[in-house]
Image (spheres, rainbow, N blue to C red):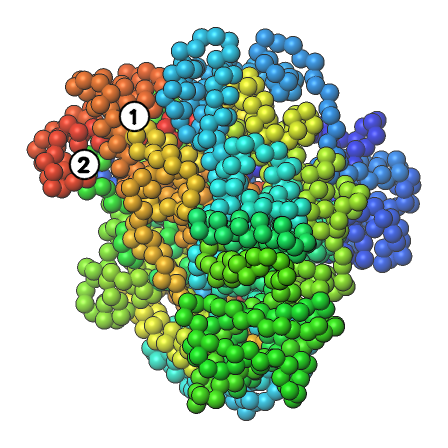
């Protein structure tokens, strides 16, 4: 079935129940005047028996696409916060302790490591680069961690560390796409879209899938990594901003109060209803629904996006500065959003591409600064979720599109001004916490220089399968029919990482 | 559906490979036995591969003998280890029967319809009073088969708005609208279409479409996304569409205008089509890597935009489904691999347009002298060089830096430092020029041939360049053959070694300015020098490497540009039309191949695209893929009929093609749906009703500005920056700011809005515009709350509401009801229904009561806090805001 046909099939369904909705809908705003924003469109349809009977794509109900739906089996997690360090931090200065690599520092890289390999920037024979951070063991688990992450060291027992993650993509954009959509090319739905398709949203007045970027650049792969691909566009991530209007144009114009806005939406929808009576185009009903949703979002979004009302100790804990577009603010927002029932929050930080071609991109300068800016808020998130009793049901994932080489980058075969490492997909580190994940455990192992995987190999598909599993989905069964075949997030791959599940 | 099933069943008729066999292969076999994987060394992509022995030593297909064909045995096998498809659901009995019959019939391969040249199809012999032209005969035939009735013609008002938005992207001008509405003759609609096609707005509307395909933007993309001045290409498009440049010339000029005899500024600017690829200015990136990326982007864009084919799959392996081989990608890429651009930050080569009065007069005067006094070849050399600064060698080709460095795309040599310029062909060179800057009035640039350990071959005295880049020229050679040149900077008056000496941008190896012995030489040379140093407007263009600077082209193993496989020469895929006889194997020859009437894809792709623009869906829905994985056309004969007519009868005229379609009864139908029709044909595949499609982001903005009397009809020029909220632009290493345009530039058509790749204009993106980092084949319309918020609250839209409110008040007397009626009529050209009028009156009254109580709010909604507000006008702004948000306004009916 083509995208168009699919869309229209949904619309037909909608048209069929239009008559039923009509009387109720006309009075939607009037009836909900006692608690505007509280009355969801979906509420009106509950019990209409409008659930799709189609064999596939059955989780999509055009009339109420974001209604909360039960998972396939009881999941441990209700929501996910995926924290992505775009650019790809060096695992060798954060999580992957490789004392043997120190001994090789400055020596030529053995030919055996270079044969048949391709690198983004390394040319000829590079030198090995020893770890540029001191490592110690922390917590009851004795997890190794570098001194770049002093705060995180206090919560290692909450974390399941994946030490042998791998990807076959070594450029940023395709690798980011693979991590978030299961395909290195554009056009597949992102993980957040799959999750909101499968589970709907607990909060009817907020988008089910929110994206926050910490100022500066968007991720390399652009908006495609929160796109809905062939899933209905209602499942695409909504990018919220932490300065200015949280969502563009969410504020009514000056001089227009809520009463007038309410009256104007009501007038627009009456006119559209009249248009529908004449043309019977189901798309008109969608338009009516979207104007209703917009009206509700105008109240709910600014509320949840305002962090200035948080108590001082919370600001202290996260290191937040209200009004700025920074990572710490976004981490706090992520907590607020999952607290309000948002299913999937994707956080992007940027500036982790430490090639060593400038101070900002140097292992010995830029990386340390980046760590400082994220260490405290990420730790605060885990502690804060825990103190609110939310960590059990919120899965936090930390990672990037790939890792970095144990060799020092020698762009164009030359020594570079700063210490840097090239892109390395073969082995890198990610971690998960909360949402039914075992704490204080390390899974997977790389060789003594962190170049290749020894055991516990984990692919993006496995991480995706595990995330879906924690939410209560069999990743092989959450499918959507498009262009004549069923698609799933994990393509034809993926296995749940049972070893890290509590 | 019934028809499809029928086709899939075996029957007494001969099996049709394309309709019956290929779909089975694509769905069940090709993922393991095709372009990507070839399990057991066996592939079903091409016949010659499929008839080969597999690894097992057996022949899977023996033509004429299904019983002994291993393929048949394996698909019928019951042992799971043996049965194909391995570990997947077995083929159905019908599918097995189809394959058996097909093998018995000789296993004949067929060519997919889209790869067969367009033939003139017979026009169906349908007769009916509904039919207006040949398009309708194709449509009616299918409708009759489906037992559907076409709809009647839409009312005049609806038709007026529909065709006007479709052809010009705008509601009609008042005079055109009046003329049509008052014309009750049979030719009224025909005249309307002619008026619209002749209006200047036509070119702007179709340019918006082409800019998506050309991935046009006003910035270079990637990390820092700096600005790029390439808007003259947009203006070239507007003129090309308005003058109805035949589509074949339109493509030839864009792909190879530089290779046409005596290109002028316009033909050069046309080639900016392929200079809209990204340039990476990020420090430390490999210029060759991103040059290669740009070349590949040009290949992919050429295929997807002009030939509806996803060719980029072939980058890494033979196409998994379509008959394109891995090395054919690189042969095709070789056509594009010899353009002069090298990912320099300056975006060379640039066309230098001497457009200010002084420069333009100088240029005319100089060319005049040259044409009279030197050979045409010499004159042309000077012309080309002044216009393009080509051929020159970019300093980014330098290497072996000693106390020197590459800064971005420039070479910097410190005191006593040196660098090498490798493999320079010096044949025929008698003069050397370097473009440089320096801050020292002392110091010299020494040039060595082949080794630094010799005497300098030339010494150039450098000077402090006070006005930016300057040029130093010395006699040079003659020296035969290729040599390595070394440059060294020496300055005895500055002490520290690390102090910057000289920064170089490019080198020229050529001959001195000609005509030394002729009268007026000195004056002419002065003109030349002053034009060299002038700072004219520039546009990035395509130019070809001269013969002594050609790059070789190779296959990239698995698509990896660093692993070069065998060398290839330019060529086109074997499955398509042959390369035109006598055409050069360069971009110009390629453009001729594309626009050859035997090319099966180019005309079909364009016809399909124009149809999609008018009806919302293409005749083949997947504009991006007419191949075997695309969705088959609903009316293939119609597609071919239009493609044939476009190329032959209409001589590639886009206006004629559009006219034929919009004059059809099919297009003119009412777009109302009834329940039976919605059930029977929800997607309007059979066209029993007219199109009803949401307007594009550009159309939405333009019509809003038009109806509120704000729209500026100023054409052409630099991109403009209308209102945009704060804090949208975010790029590192880039302090460019959105600086709001002034006066009428705030209200120009959307096609003139500045397009920043990493951060396009928000309302464009919200209404499904694209980033334009790569070619955008079609926009998929969505319907989201963010769109509602934009049309309700974006300041740009609020300003329109104010304009419309004032207009309504001016259209008639004080009666509010009449004002709304008149306003609605101005928008929709017809009378408002009672239900709609009542809804708006109610809104007006609620708002009026509020603004009478709250004068401050009234001032604010009117946009001027300091002016005493008129509550009536304030209330009318709210009404206008609502009217501009109605579904019928956002759509064309």
Q: Position of residue A128 (x, y in %)?
A: 56, 85
Please determine if labels 1 and 2 lie on a single subunit.
no
Classify the position of the N terminus of chain B by image quarter.
top right
Question: Which residue is at 14% across, 38% downward?
Answer: B859
Residue B668 visible in the snapshot:
yes
Question: Which residue is at 46% across, 16% downward?
Answer: B154
Q: Which residue is mark 2?
A: B862
Q: Position of residue B869 (x, y in %)?
A: 12, 34
Q: Which residue is mark 1?
A: A270
**SS for callout 2:** loop
Q: Quick one: which residue is furthest to the bottom in this view?
A: A103
Foreground mark, 1 or 2? 2
**SS for callout 1:** helix
Along the line of sight, the residue nearer the viewer: B195 or B502: B502
State which chain disc 1 sits on.
A
Rendering quarter of residue B26: top right
Residue B347 visible in the snapshot:
no
Give left or right: position of B596 versus B435: right
């Amino acid at each position: 079935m083509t995208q168009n046909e699919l869309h229209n099939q949904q619309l037909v369904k909608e048209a069929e129940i239009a008559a039923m909705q009509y009387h109720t809908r006309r009075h939607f705003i009037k009836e909900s005047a006692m608690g505007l924003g509280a009355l969801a469109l979906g509420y009106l349809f509950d019990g209409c028996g409008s659930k799709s009977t189609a064999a596939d794509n059955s989780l999509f109900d055009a009339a109420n696409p974001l209604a909360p739906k039960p998972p396939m089996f009881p999941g441990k997690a209700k929501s996910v916060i995926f924290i992505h360090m775009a650019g790809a931090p060096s695992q060798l200065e954060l999580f992957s302790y490789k004392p043997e690599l120190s001994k090789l520092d400055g020596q030529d890289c053995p030919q055996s490591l270079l044969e048949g390999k391709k690198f983004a920037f390394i040319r000829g024979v590079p030198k090995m680069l020893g770890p540029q951070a001191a490592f110690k063991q922390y917590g009851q688990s004795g997890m190794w961690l570098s001194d770049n992450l002093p705060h995180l060291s206090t919560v290692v027992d909450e974390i399941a560390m994946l030490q042998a993650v791998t990807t076959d993509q070594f450029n940023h954009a395709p690798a980011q796409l693979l991590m978030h959509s299961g395909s290195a090319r554009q056009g597949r739905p992102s993980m957040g879209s799959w999750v909101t398709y499968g589970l709907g949203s607990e909060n009817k007045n907020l988008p089910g899938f929110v994206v926050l970027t910490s100022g500066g650049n968007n991720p390399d792969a652009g908006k495609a990594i929160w796109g809905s691909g062939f899933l209905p566009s209602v499942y695409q991530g909504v990018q919220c901003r932490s300065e200015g209007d949280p969502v563009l144009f969410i504020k009514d114009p000056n001089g227009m109060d809520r009463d007038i806005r309410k009256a104007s939406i009501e007038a627009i929808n009456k006119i559209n209803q009249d248009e529908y009576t004449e043309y019977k185009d189901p798309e008109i009903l969608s338009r009516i629904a979207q104007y209703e949703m917009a009206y509700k979002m105008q109240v709910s979004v600014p509320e949840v996006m305002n962090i200035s009302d948080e108590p001082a100790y919370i600001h202290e804990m996260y290191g937040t500065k209200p009004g700025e577009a920074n990572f710490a603010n976004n981490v706090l927002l992520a907590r607020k959003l999952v607290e309000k029932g948002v299913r999937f929050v994707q956080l992007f930080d940027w500036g982790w591409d430490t090639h060593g071609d400038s101070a900002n991109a140097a292992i010995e300068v830029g990386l340390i600064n980046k760590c400082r800016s994220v260490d405290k808020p990420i730790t605060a998130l885990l502690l804060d979720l825990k103190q609110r009793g939310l960590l059990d049901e919120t899965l936090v994932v930390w990672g990037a599109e790939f890792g970095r080489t144990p060799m020092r980058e020698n762009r164009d075969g030359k020594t570079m001004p700063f210490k840097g490492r090239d892109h390395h997909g073969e082995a890198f580190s990610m971690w998960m916490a909360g949402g039914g994940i075992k704490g204080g455990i390390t899974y997977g192992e790389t060789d003594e220089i962190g170049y290749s995987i020894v055991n516990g190999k984990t692919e993006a598909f496995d991480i995706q399968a595990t995330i879906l599993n924690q939410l209560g989905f069999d990743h092989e069964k959450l499918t959507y029919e498009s262009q004549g075949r069923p698609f799933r997030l994990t393509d034809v791959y993926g296995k749940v990482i049972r070893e890290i599940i509590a | 559906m019934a028809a499809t099933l029928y086709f899939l069943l075996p029957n007494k008729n001969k099996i049709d490979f394309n309709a019956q066999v290929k779909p089975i292969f694509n769905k069940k076999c090709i993922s393991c036995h095709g372009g990507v994987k070839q399990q057991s060394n066996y592939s079903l992509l091409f016949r010659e591969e499929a008839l080969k022995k597999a690894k097992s030593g057996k022949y899977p297909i023996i033509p004429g003998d299904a019983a002994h064909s291993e393929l048949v045995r394996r698909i019928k096998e019951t042992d799971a280890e043996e049965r194909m498809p391995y570990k997947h659901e077995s083929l159905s009995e019908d599918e097995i029967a189809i394959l058996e019959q097909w093998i018995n019939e000789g296993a004949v391969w067929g060519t997919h319809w889209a790869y067969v040249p367009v033939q003139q199809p017979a026009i169906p012999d349908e007769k009916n009073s509904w039919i207006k032209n040949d398009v309708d005969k194709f449509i009616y035939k299918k409708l009759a088969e489906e037992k559907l009735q076409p709809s009647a013609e839409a009312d005049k008002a609806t038709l007026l708005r529909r065709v006007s938005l479709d052809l010009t992207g705008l509601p009609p001008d008042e005079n055109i609208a009046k003329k049509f509405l008052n014309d009750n003759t049979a030719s009224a609609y025909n005249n309307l279409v002619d008026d619209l096609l002749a209006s200047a707005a036509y070119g702007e509307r179709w340019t918006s479409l082409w800019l998506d395909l050309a991935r046009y933007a006003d910035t270079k993309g990637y990390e820092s996304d700096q600005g790029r001045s390439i808007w003259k290409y947009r203006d070239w498009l507007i003129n090309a569409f308005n003058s109805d440049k035949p589509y074949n010339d339109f493509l030839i000029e864009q792909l190879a205008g530089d290779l046409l005899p005596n290109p002028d500024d316009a033909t050069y600017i046309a080639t900016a089509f392929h200079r809209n690829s990204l340039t990476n200015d990020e420090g430390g990136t490999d210029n060759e890597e991103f040059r290669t990326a740009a070349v590949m982007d040009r290949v992919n864009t050429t295929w997807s935009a002009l030939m509806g084919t996803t060719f980029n799959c072939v980058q890494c392996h033979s196409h998994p489904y379509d008959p394109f081989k891995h090395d054919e990608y690189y042969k095709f890429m070789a056509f594009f691999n010899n353009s002069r651009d090298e990912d320099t930050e300056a975006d060379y080569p640039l066309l230098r347009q001497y457009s200010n009065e002084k420069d333009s007069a100088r240029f005319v005067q100089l060319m005049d002298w040259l044409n009279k006094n030197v050979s045409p070849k010499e004159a042309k050399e000077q012309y080309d060089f002044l216009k393009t600064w080509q051929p020159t060698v970019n300093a980014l080709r330098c290497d072996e830096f000693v106390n020197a460095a590459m800064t971005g795309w420039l070479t910097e040599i410190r005191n006593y430092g040196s660098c090498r310029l490798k493999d320079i062909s010096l044949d025929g060179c008698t003069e050397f020029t370097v473009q440089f800057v320096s801050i020292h009035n002392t110091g010299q640039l020494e040039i060595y041939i082949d080794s630094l350990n010799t005497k300098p071959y030339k010494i150039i005295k450098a000077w402090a360049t006070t006005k930016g880049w300057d040029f130093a020229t010395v006699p040079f050679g003659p020296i035969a053959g290729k040599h390595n040149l070394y440059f060294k900077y020496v300055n005895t008056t500055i002490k520290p070694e690390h102090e910057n000496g000289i920064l170089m941008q490019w080198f020229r190896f050529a001959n001195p300015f000609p005509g030394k012995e002729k009268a007026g030489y000195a004056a002419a040379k002065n003109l030349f020098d002053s034009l060299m140093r002038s700072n004219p407007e520039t546009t990035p263009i395509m130019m070809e490497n001269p013969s002594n600077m050609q790059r070789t082209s190779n296959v990239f193993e698995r698509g990896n540009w660093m692993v070069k496989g065998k060398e290839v020469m330019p060529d086109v895929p074997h499955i398509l039309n042959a390369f035109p006889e006598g055409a050069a194997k360069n971009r110009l020859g390629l453009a001729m191949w594309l626009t050859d009437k035997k090319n099966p894809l180019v005309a079909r792709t364009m016809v399909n695209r124009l149809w999609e623009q008018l009806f919302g869906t293409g005749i083949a829905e997947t504009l991006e893929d007419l191949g075997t994985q695309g969705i088959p056309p609903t009316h293939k004969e119609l597609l071919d009929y239009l493609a044939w007519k476009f190329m032959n009868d209409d001589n590639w005229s886009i206006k004629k093609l559009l006219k034929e379609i919009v004059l059809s009864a099919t297009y003119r139908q009412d777009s109302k749906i009834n329940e039976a029709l919605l059930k029977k044909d929800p997607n309007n595949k059979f066209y029993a009703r007219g199109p009803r499609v949401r307007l594009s982001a550009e159309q939405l903005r333009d019509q809003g500005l038009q109806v509120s009397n704000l729209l500026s009809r100023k054409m052409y020029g630099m991109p403009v920056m209308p209102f945009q909220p704060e804090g949208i632009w975010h790029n590192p290493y880039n302090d460019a700011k959105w600086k709001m345009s002034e006066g009428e530039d705030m209200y120009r058509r959307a096609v003139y809005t500045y397009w920043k790749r990493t951060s396009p204009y928000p309302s464009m993106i919200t209404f499904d515009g694209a980033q334009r980092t790569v070619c955008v084949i079609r926009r998929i319309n969505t319907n989201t709350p963010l769109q509602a918020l934009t049309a309700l609250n974006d300041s740009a839209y609020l300003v329109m509401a104010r304009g419309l409110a004032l207009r309504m008040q001016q259209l008639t007397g004080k009666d509010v009801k009449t004002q709304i009626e008149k306003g609605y009529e101005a928008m929709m050209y017809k009378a408002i229904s009672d239900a709609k009028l009542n809804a708006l009156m109610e809104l007006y009254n609620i708002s009026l009561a509020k603004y009478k109580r709250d004068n401050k709010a009234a001032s604010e909604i009117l946009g001027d806090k300091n002016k005493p507000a008129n509550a009536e006008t304030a209330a009318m702004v709210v009404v206008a805001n609502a009217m501009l948000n109605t579904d019928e306004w956002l759509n064309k009916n």
